Image (tube, grey):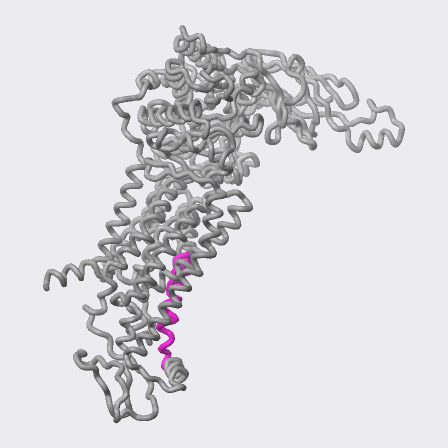
């Protein structure tokens, strides 16, 4: 019997078993999520890929910073062309084009572009020419301040491996590879590809990108369900993706762009973005190099493995082509499986559970009420006609109803207290150390998580002072909290369904699943009550007895002190007496609960949402914590940490009444330690350096040079304080309009820090009342610009493709900047522009004044850009030097790192008026 008692105790809803199960479950989930978030090992069998060769290619590609406007860019171009010729040699169905012809004009954001492409295109003819092919894209240029190992050297090295693989194993469909140039200067290489006839051969694409410095590549976004199917574990061994990132792009939360949007908007293709996203503090800095890449060769292998699997699917499986399935919902589980279904299916699922769930639970609760009434009657309870009202009145006067009310209200009080404390915690971060998430995201997450646990535990273990034992039985508390949790998820599901339908957001899949499993747990609890599980409402009935005036009746065999309902006898008074409640049993009995039922409910309602929330937490923190240096709001970062913490703890709320207080003590220690660390520590380090943005502007009319550094207002002056040139001159710091949330400090550079070989010449002549022709030449550059004080409505580069690219015309309000890019060095651009004469022309017509005398003129600046500096161009023939940038590299503190502010590290300009 003792063994049976121990077994029963071990599986009962008691403090120790519940605490052990909860701790083990959360530890198992957190450890598994953390481990599977790391890069997997490189397998011995590489399935037709060659990681050693790819890594060697990467070292060549990322040997120097190589932006479009650099001589190192030409070296990378020549290296890639030689490699591709070696790879495709002897294969008649493989074709290479060094595209030195495609050019065009297009408008993007608030500016317009003329660009001459130098893309390298490869086409592998498929076995079936009738089917549309697949496009694979990556860009071989980098920014001026980074060698570009991750952005996008790994993508290019991966394309080289894919070309070699598919050349040897000819695919069913035609494969087109666009190794493009000029992406960093706002997607110019992809636009140039649209000018080429091969852009019409494909209906789907895979774009490889790098928005960080390594780690696991993520399915960033996808156009529809069809291309996402190519990421199933059938094709990709370690899939990683979440529809949340796609929704963030669609709603403008993520403001950066990739070639993906050009292929979608400019050609209407379906496809997907595969990109690195962790370690953004090194993105676009000197640390985006082979030596500092997070994961090194394993990161490269992760992209190669994923891209190979997707390419095989896109080139052989008809189901992954086209817009089949509509908007997708997708997420991976532990990097082992990709769950994919259409958004329409999720909405249908939601509607079913919104209607069926409450009705089914109401039916079960109704059955329980009927059965309890029958149990009372079978127990011999007899009440006179006024008994119900009298008992209700007695319960009201004695405040016994408070216990029942609190049993249901404590969940909502706990939720309100938890949210309130999380808000206070976020306020503490914002006022005391708003940048700490930049380097210590896990400390922030643990702080919020432990606080959410403490508030939930404390409130759920408060009992009403007039509470009777029957109203705080553990089983009843658990079931009441589950019902309230179901009500919360139902309300969330209703809102999620409305928003998903209106905004096509798939990120609400978590709420859909959560509502379904909480519904299942509630239904299981109702069934347990129907079967009279120990510790449920039926037990509470056994604690109620009837006092007859002057007489107390006990059932035979009951323990002393426990009074129970008795059948009427000849000494029973004619007037019914009020019911009162017996004394609660000993603590050992109070700890007992429904055997096994609670465990089934726990396993149903807790692990699944905690797993999904934990994966979301890691993804959100890794993607957002270091965007603070770019001017992103800290409220978003800390709000996300608090949100996922609350969502991770809420499933545990129904079981909080049976968690050991020592666990709360441990969580209190974690909270104090993590919060103190996060509020007091300096937020930056060499492994997570603060990014600042550099540019020099040279006024060639007055021969003055201004150095500018842009960064976070709280740390910018501290960052600049070590620069000798900044301390010797006047410092002017203002809010930056281009990078919202950041501050720019500017100072005049001494002669020794003026850039070398910065020269331009121009000529402008007015052709008509509202047109003019510019001739612009820059020395040792192939990037210049025209800035206009008033908008121009049309422009045309002489010798370039006529007109604007389809769907990228100049907006009706005009543009105030035209960017000029040439594939040749020192080119002279000839540009015709036309501007709107506006009210001036109207008055001239009204007054019959000759147009040339009355039309408004045009003024602005002619500028050219330079991006090469000495330490970044070792072994590259170039005369350009930027001493001020070398000073920044030398004297910035170890916890800060420079990046480029704009396309050119140096911009020289002259004013014009015509």
Instruction: Locate the C terminus by quadrant.
Output: top right
Based on the displayed image, in which of its 4 quarters is residue 591 positioned?
bottom left
Question: Which stretch is magenta?
Answer: 397-420
Q: Is residue 381 left or right of residue 266?
A: left
In the picture as drawn, the residue positioned furthest to the left comes out as: 2
In the rendered view, tell whether residue 187 sits above or below residue 348. Answer: above
Question: Magenta stretch containing residue 410, yes or no?
Answer: yes
Q: What residue lies at 46% left-to-right and 52% top-to-bottom?
A: 352
Front residue of this view, candidates 544 and 98? 544
Based on the displayed image, in which of its 4 quarters is residue 39 positioned?
top left
Q: Is residue 22 left or right of residue 180?
A: left
Task: Name the spot of residue 557 as percent of width and height, x first.
Answer: 16, 79
Task: Name the spot of residue 165 as percent of width and height, x first.
Answer: 37, 17
Question: Magenta stretch containing residue 506, yes or no?
Answer: no
Front residue of this view, candidates 205 and 367? 367
Task: Name the spot of residue 222 as percent of width and height, x first.
Answer: 47, 33
In the rendered view, tell whether residue 822 sits above or below residue 316. Answer: above
Task: Name the spot of residue 579 as percent of width and height, x first.
Answer: 32, 83
Q: What residue lies at 88% left-to-right and 32% top-to-bottom?
A: 846
Instruction: Locate the N terminus by quadrant.
Output: bottom left
Task: Mark yes or no: residue 403 visible.
Answer: yes
Query: What count of labels does the image hold?
Result: 0
Decide whether the magenta segment is chiefly helix, strand or loop. helix
Task: Mark yes or no: residue 281 visible.
Answer: no
Front residue of this view, candidates 456 and 765? 456
Based on the displayed image, in which of its 4 quarters is residue 907 positioned?
top right
Q: What residue lies at 46% left-to-right and 22% top-to-bottom?
A: 136
Front residue of this view, candidates 1 and 635? 1
In the picture as drawn, the residue positioned furthest to the right comes out as: 848
């Amino acid at each position: 019997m003792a063994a049976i008692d121990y077994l029963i105790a071990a599986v009962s809803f008691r403090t120790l078993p519940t605490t052990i199960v909860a701790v083990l479950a959360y530890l198992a989930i957190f450890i598994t999520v953390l481990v599977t978030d790391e890069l997997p090992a490189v397998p011995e069998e590489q399935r037709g890929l060659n990681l050693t060769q790819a890594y060697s290619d990467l070292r060549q590609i990322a040997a120097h910073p190589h932006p479009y406007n650099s001589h190192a860019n030409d070296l990378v171009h020549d290296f890639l062309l030689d490699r591709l010729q070696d790879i495709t040699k002897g294969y008649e169905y493989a074709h290479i084009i060094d595209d030195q012809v495609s050019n065009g004009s297009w408008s993007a954001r608030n500016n317009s572009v003329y660009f001459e492409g130098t893309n390298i295109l490869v086409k592998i003819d498929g076995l079936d020419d009738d089917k549309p092919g697949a496009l694979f894209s990556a860009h071989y240029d980098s920014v001026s301040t980074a060698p570009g190992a991750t952005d996008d050297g790994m993508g290019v090295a991966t394309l080289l491996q894919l070309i070699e693989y598919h050349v040897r194993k000819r695919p069913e469909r035609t494969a087109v590879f666009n190794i493009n140039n000029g992406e960093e200067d706002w997607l110019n290489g992809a636009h140039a590809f649209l000018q080429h006839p091969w852009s019409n051969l494909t209906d789907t694409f895979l774009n490889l990108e790098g928005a960080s410095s390594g780690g696991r590549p993520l399915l960033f976004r996808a156009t529809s369900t069809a291309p996402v199917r190519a990421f199933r574990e059938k094709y990709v061994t370690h899939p990683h993706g979440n529809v949340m990132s796609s929704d963030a792009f669609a709603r403008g939360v993520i403001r950066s762009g990739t070639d993906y949007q050009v292929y979608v908007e400019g050609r209407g293709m379906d496809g997907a973005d595969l990109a690195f996203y962790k370690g953004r503090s090194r993105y676009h800095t000197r640390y985006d190099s082979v030596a500092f890449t997070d994961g090194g060769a394993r990161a490269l292998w992760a992209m190669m493995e994923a891209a190979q699997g997707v390419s095989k699917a896109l080139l052989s499986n008809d189901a992954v082509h086209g817009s089949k399935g509509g908007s997708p919902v997708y997420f991976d589980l532990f990097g082992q499986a990709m769950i994919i279904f259409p958004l329409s299916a999720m909405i249908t699922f939601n509607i079913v559970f919104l209607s069926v769930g409450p009705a089914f639970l109401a039916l079960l609760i109704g059955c329980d009420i009927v059965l309890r009434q029958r149990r009372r009657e079978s127990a011999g309870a007899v009440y006179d006609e006024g008994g119900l009202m009298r008992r209700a009145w007695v319960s009201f006067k004695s405040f016994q109803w408070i216990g029942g009310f609190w049993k249901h209200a404590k969940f909502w009080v706990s939720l309100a207290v938890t949210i309130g404390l999380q808000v206070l915690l976020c306020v503490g971060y914002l006022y005391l150390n708003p940048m700490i998430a930049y380097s210590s995201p896990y400390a922030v997450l643990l702080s919020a998580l432990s606080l959410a646990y403490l508030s939930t535990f404390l409130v759920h273990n408060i009992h009403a002072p007039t509470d009777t034992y029957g109203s705080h039985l553990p089983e009843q508390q658990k079931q009441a909290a589950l019902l309230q949790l179901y009500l919360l998820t139902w309300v969330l599901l209703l809102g999620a369904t409305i928003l998903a339908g209106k905004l096509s957001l798939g990120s609400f899949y978590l709420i859909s699943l959560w509502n379904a499993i909480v519904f299942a747990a509630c239904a299981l609890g109702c069934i347990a009550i129907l079967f009279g599980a120990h510790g449920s409402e039926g037990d509470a009935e056994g604690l109620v007895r009837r006092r007859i005036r002057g007489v107390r009746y006990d059932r035979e065999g009951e323990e002393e002190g426990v009074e129970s309902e008795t059948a009427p006898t000849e000494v029973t008074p004619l007037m019914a007496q009020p019911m009162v409640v017996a004394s609660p049993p000993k603590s050992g009995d109070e700890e007992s609960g429904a055997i096994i039922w609670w465990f089934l409910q726990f396993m149903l309602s807790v692990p699944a949402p905690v797993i999904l929330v934990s994966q979301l937490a890691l993804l959100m923190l890794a993607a957002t914590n270091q965007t603070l240096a770019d001017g992103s709001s800290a409220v978003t970062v800390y709000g996300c940490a608090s949100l996922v913490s609350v969502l991770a703890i809420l499933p545990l709320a129904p079981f909080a009444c049976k968690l050991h207080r020592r666990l709360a003590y441990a969580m209190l220690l974690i909270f104090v330690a993590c919060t103190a660390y996060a509020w007091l520590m300096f937020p930056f380090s060499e492994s997570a350096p603060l990014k600042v943005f550099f540019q020099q502007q040279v006024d060639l009319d007055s021969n003055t040079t201004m150095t500018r550094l842009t960064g976070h207002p709280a740390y910018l002056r501290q960052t600049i304080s070590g620069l000798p040139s900044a301390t010797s001159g006047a410092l002017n710091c203002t809010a930056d309009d281009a990078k919202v949330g950041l501050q720019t400090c500017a100072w005049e550079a001494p002669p020794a820090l003026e850039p070398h070989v910065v020269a331009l010449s121009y000529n402008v002549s007015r052709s008509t009342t509202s047109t003019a022709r510019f001739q612009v030449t820059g020395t040792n550059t192939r990037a210049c610009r025209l800035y206009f004080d008033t908008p121009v409505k049309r422009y045309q580069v002489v010798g370039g493709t006529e007109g604007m690219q389809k769907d990228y015309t100049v907006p009706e309000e005009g543009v105030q900047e035209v960017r000029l890019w040439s594939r040749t060095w020192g080119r002279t651009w000839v540009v015709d522009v036309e501007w709107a004469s506006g009210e001036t022309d109207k008055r001239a017509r009204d007054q019959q004044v000759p147009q040339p005398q009355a039309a408004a003129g045009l003024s602005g600046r002619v500028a050219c850009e330079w991006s090469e500096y000495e330490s970044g161009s070792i072994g590259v023939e170039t005369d350009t030097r930027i001493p001020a940038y070398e000073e920044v590299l030398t004297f910035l503190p170890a916890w800060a790192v420079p990046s480029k502010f704009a396309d050119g590290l140096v911009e020289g300009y002259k004013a014009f008026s015509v």
